[in-house]
Image: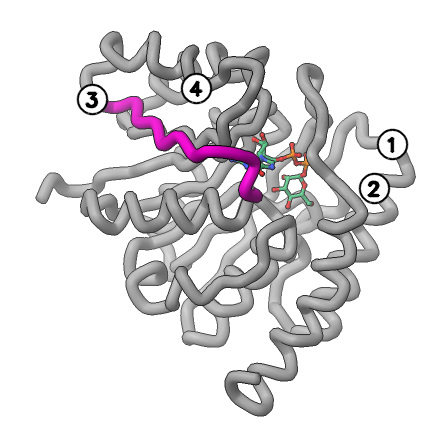
Amino acid sequence: MMSDKTLVIVPTYNESHNVPRLIEQVMGLAPAMHLLIVDDGSPDGTAQIVKDQQEQYGGRLHLIERSGKLGLGTAYVRGFKYALEHEYDYICEMDADFSHDPDDLPRLVNKVKNSDADVAIGSRYADGISIINWPLSRLILSYSANLYARYITGLPIFDTTAGFKCIHRNVLEHIPVDGIKSNGYAFQIELHFRAWQAGFTLREVAIIFREREEGVSKMSKGIVWEAIWRVWTLKLQSIFGTL
Ligand SMILES: Nc1nc2c(ncn2[C@@H]2O[C@H](COP(=O)(O)OP(=O)(O)O[C@H]3O[C@H](CO)[C@@H](O)[C@H](O)[C@@H]3O)[C@@H](O)[C@H]2O)c(=O)[nH]1
């Protein structure tokens, strides 16, 4: 096994305007990282753009194509299994739309490599509120969802729904990733909760989150509802065992 292999997993749905620059930026980082795009049959041809660039990056750019829009959570679970099968040590999550700055990836990876953190979370709320250009309504929704999830679950972090992080391979080997049932942004809460319950250390690293400039958010009412009820099932499961 190569030492210190890092895989950045990016789920995509209709991100053709973002993915060329995303690939260029992640492939240009030092130390070198691998990038896995998990695309859900995007009608705008996102997957084809990835395929066209694969040869250029000598085996560092990977693609999983799924048949339709199956959700953010299952896309990450698919990516985690790929990471374990291919023996990556550090596994990162990131959005395709530059809300997360790829240049912050080395900071997250270093946090896991060089501190007690098993999961380093790129946090919008660790240092006040560091979000640029979100409408006030979205900011209020996200902030209150995070307070609510933190209060009910007891998670020791401020950004429970963060989708930007680095995870040590050990975490994914020890929590049953197939058992993560949330599929929207609640997936992030559930992943943090299961890692924390298993005794792993979560640490927040302050980042600046920027509203996307290209494409649209896939946020929906269903995603919000799932987060509202899911935190209760997580809490109850932790008290009573599997429901
Ligand atoms: N493969 C796949 N990818 C998806 C799907 N839904 C969304 N994505 C991809 O997942 C990433 C995040 O989706 P967005 O729709 O851009 O998220 P957002 O509204 O900006 O939400 C942000 O905030 C959430 C809550 O705070 C975070 O949980 C989320 O990760 C993200 O950072 C993007 O790369 C998007 O293309 C899906 O069904 N399938």
Q: Earlier in the sequence, mark 4 or mark 2?
A: 4
| Residue most extreme to the left | 1
Q: Which residue is nearer to you in this view: 52 or 7? A: 52
Q: Earlier in the sequence, mark 1 or mark 4?
A: 4
For label 2, count other residues whose C-alpha is less than 10 Å away and answer few (under 14), some (14-19) or many (20+): some
Q: What residue type is disc 2 on?
A: Leu
Q: Is residue 56 left or right of residue 183?
A: left
Distance in Å between CA atoms under marks 1 and 4: 30 Å
Asked which secondary structure carries label 1, the reply is loop
Q: Which residue is nearer to you in this view: 56 or 160? A: 56
Q: What residue type is disc 1 on?
A: Pro
Residue identified by numbered label 4: 47
For label 1, count other residues whose C-alpha is less than 10 Å away and answer few (under 14), some (14-19) or many (20+): few
Please say if the residues under marks 1 and 4 sit with CB atoms less than 8 Å apart.
no
Distance in Å between CA atoms under marks 4 and 2: 31 Å
Quarter of the image where the C terminus is located: bottom right
Distance in Å between CA atoms under marks 2 and 1: 6 Å
Q: Is residue 42 left or right of residue 131?
A: left
**Numbered badge on residue 59:** 3
Q: Earlier in the sequence, mark 3 or mark 1?
A: 3
Please say if the residues under marks 2 and 1 sit with CB atoms less than 8 Å apart.
yes
- In the image, the segment drawn in magenta is 60-71
